[in-house]
Image: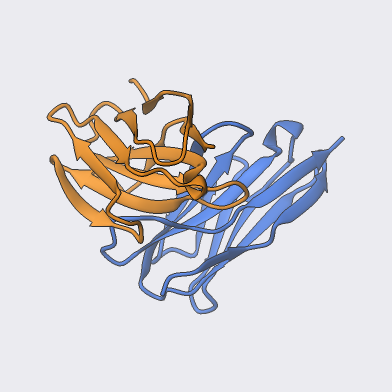
Amino acid sequence: ETGVTQSPTHLIKTRGQQVTLRCSSQSGHNTVSWYQQALGQGPQFIFQYYREEENGRGNFPPRFSGLQFPNYSSELNVNALELDDSALYLCASSSPSGNYEQYFGPGTRLTVT
Amino acid sequence: GEDVEQSLFLSVREGDSSVINCTYTDSSSTYLYWYKQEPGAGLQLLTYIFSNMDMKQDQRLTVLLNKKDKHLSLRIADTQTGDSAIYFCAERAGSARQLTFGSGTQLTVLP
């Protein structure tokens, strides 16, 4: 069984640029959630995708957007990057039939300069 | 609103038991989780408990839930140096889609 994978591992961008992060969900999981983890803090929920539609959103501005594809993989897009967007971005997949356990990928470390 | 709190640091001697505590505010929490994060890595799900339970044991891990006080704890028996990591408590409230995490407890295991 393949776990959750994310790419790239690390990324450096300049303020004002746009970035796309990618996630492949665990086999059999059709729900993907994205979280932002700033240094020294717990993960903060950005949004969730289920069956290619946004299924819940946290307190993040519209410049954070996402997509889910028919194979359940997902993208997180961030426009007009700000310095405070520097963080570890975590993707988690889950199955609605389970006990809502979310299984996390290794994350993408984004640095905005 | 939802809020999950944890103490920031815990140090124990190798072979001792570790107890990591967590409090939450949302009385509609349905599931509560413990995750482990090692340096530079993602989060590893350790265990979870449903809100109608008060205890769950899984090998060296014991989870205790006091729903009245909204207090959750994770006990690690016979703590090893490989257990050194940050431990996060998280809750899923009601029908919410997301997990709400605490700030994490840095566990240091001393030889």
Image position, residue A98 (x, y; %): 27, 45
Q: Does A89 sit above or below residue B20?
A: above
Relative to A95, B9 lies left or right:
right
Q: Colour of chain A?
A: orange
Q: Please name the color used to draw chain B.
A: blue
Q: Nearer the viewer, residue A36 or B73?
A: A36
Is residue A70 placed above or below B37 in the rendered structure? above
Give left or right: position of B101 versus A48: right
Which residue is pictured at 74% across the width and 41% down the height?
A: B78
Residue A32 image-quadrant placement: top left
**A16 and A51: which is toward the camera:** A16
Left or right, B85 with respect to A33, comes to: right
- Give the quarter of the figure containing the C terminus of chain B: top right
Q: Position of residue A44 (x, y in %)?
A: 44, 53
Outermost bottom residue: B68
Whether residue B45 appears in this view of the structure is no
Where residue A34 sits in the image (x, y, percent)? 35, 44
Residue A51, percent from left and from top: 13, 41
